[in-house]
Amino acid sequence: MEQGLTCNVGNCEAQLTDQALVTACRFVGALLLSAVHVLCLKCASNHRFAVQGPYTCPVCQQPLAASEVCKQLLYPSEEWNSVVLSGLSPTMVMEYAGKALSF
């Protein structure tokens, strides 16, 4: 049985059913690492993601630019998927598919 996504903030762990806020966090140190954190909309609001940045990820405490935060549909329709990918080169579609699979 497939489990759904849950909020990554502290003890929230709310089931994510429709939309979520997704961050693209980078850790700079000895190695450059990246992570994706998923927040329920309630936690996103509680951590002031509804106002203009700058932002701080509530999961890893990394600073985030506005371009590193995105409200995302979690289960878009097939029609939406077709529209989003139309006009992209096969190379770009494969690149995006690879990123999605690594998530």
Image (spheres, rainbow, N blue to C red):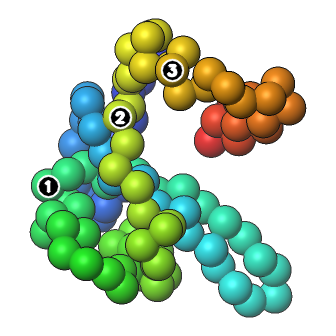
Amino acid beneath label 3 = Val
Q: CA distance from mark 3 to mark 1?
A: 29 Å
Above or below 81: residue 100: below
Residue 42 has which mark? 1
Relative image position of residue 89 (x, y in whole percent)? 80, 29
Apparent side of residue 32 relative to residue 19 in the rendered image (left or right)? right
Q: Which residue is mark 2?
A: 73
- Rendered-image quadrant of the N terminus: top left
Q: CA distance from mark 2 to mark 3?
A: 14 Å
At 67% from the left edge and 26% from the top edge, which residue is drawn? Answer: 87
Amino acid beneath label 1 = Lys
Q: Nearer the viewer, residue 14 or 82?
A: 82
Mark 2: few/some/many CA within 10 Å (<14, 14-19, 20+): few
Apparent side of residue 26 relative to residue 23 in the rendered image (left or right)? right
Mark 2 or mark 1, which is nearer the start of the sequence? Answer: 1
Q: Nearer the viewer, mark 2 or mark 3?
A: 3
At 49% from the left edge and 68% from the top edge, which residue is drawn? Answer: 67
Mark 1 or mark 3, which is nearer the start of the sequence? Answer: 1
Q: Which residue is mark 3?
A: 83
Residue 74 has which mark? none
Please say whether residue 65 is visible from this viewpoint.
Answer: yes
Apparent side of residue 27 relative to residue 37 in the rendered image (left or right)? right
Relative image position of residue 37 (x, y in whole percent)? 46, 57
Amino acid beneath label 2 = Leu
- Rendered-image quadrant of the C terminus: top right
Give SS at disc 2.
Answer: strand
Q: Residue 12's quadrant in the figure?
A: bottom left
